[in-house]
Image (cartoon, rainbow, N blue to C red):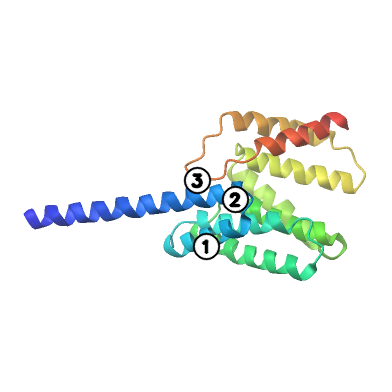
Amino acid sequence: MKNIMIAFVVLTSFTINAQNSYEKGMEKAFALWGENKTTEAVQLFERIAKVEKDNWLPPFYVATIEILGSFGLKDEAKLEAKLKKAQEYLDEAKTLSEDNPEIMITQALLNTAYIAFDGQRYGMSLSTKNIILYAEAEKLAPKNPRVVLGKAEWNMGSAEFFNQPIDPYCKNVEKALKLLDTDNPEKYHPRWGKERGEQLLKKCKKG
């Protein structure tokens, strides 16, 4: 009995230490990201992903940072390197968390990065994929504010491209902002949206 108790204490201590190490790593990675030290943040998320092999969040954040960093790039080789790496980590996250709406809309964002770089080359094929991704994500999580906001922004961008009014989609931006007021994701799960939603709402009021 004594040996069983000792084993239990050792196992519990190991679990707590591992959890503390994970949390410290995640906090540090988010802090680096917040300081715009994206390279260091990516490297730390990569190291965490190697340890936390069953956790979709570290690879998800590697992909997210690389995708966001690709917008505005003019060098195709650099853009391709970032988005290829992002896709690899996003695929890893998908295998760990299937039918995850957060991953779906991030895949759509990756596709949008390609479209933004060269709409003529990527627009037709990836636009269709994005429509499907947003529809699937909305079906799975109709009250997820990032899903609602992402789909609204995608539709607004499409409307602008075809010289159509964005007004029909502004109500969904407002809906996303209301959903964000009660949004309570788990620790380290995505919680963004408010700042972007407010930017889009200002755009709606202007136009």
| Neighbours of disc 3 within 10 Å: few (<14), some (14-19), many (20+) | few
| Neighbours of disc 1 within 10 Å: few (<14), some (14-19), many (20+) | many
Asked whether residue 1 is in view, the answer is no
Residue lying at the far right in this picture: please name it.
163
User: 191 left or right of 17?
Assistant: right
Q: Which numbered mark, 3 or 1, is in the foreground of this view? A: 1
Marking on residue 33: 2
Question: What residue type is disc 3 on?
Answer: Tyr
Residue lying at the far bottom in this picture: please name it.
77
Q: Marks 1 and 2, how far apart in space?
A: 13 Å
Question: What residue type is disc 1 on?
Answer: Glu
Q: Which residue is mark 3?
A: 188
Q: Position of residue 33 (x, y in %)?
A: 59, 50
Q: Which residue is mark 1?
A: 46
Query: Is 185 located above or below residue 86 in the figure?
Result: above
Q: Residue at x 57, y 54 (%)?
A: 61
User: N-terminal of the two: label 3 or label 2?
Assistant: 2
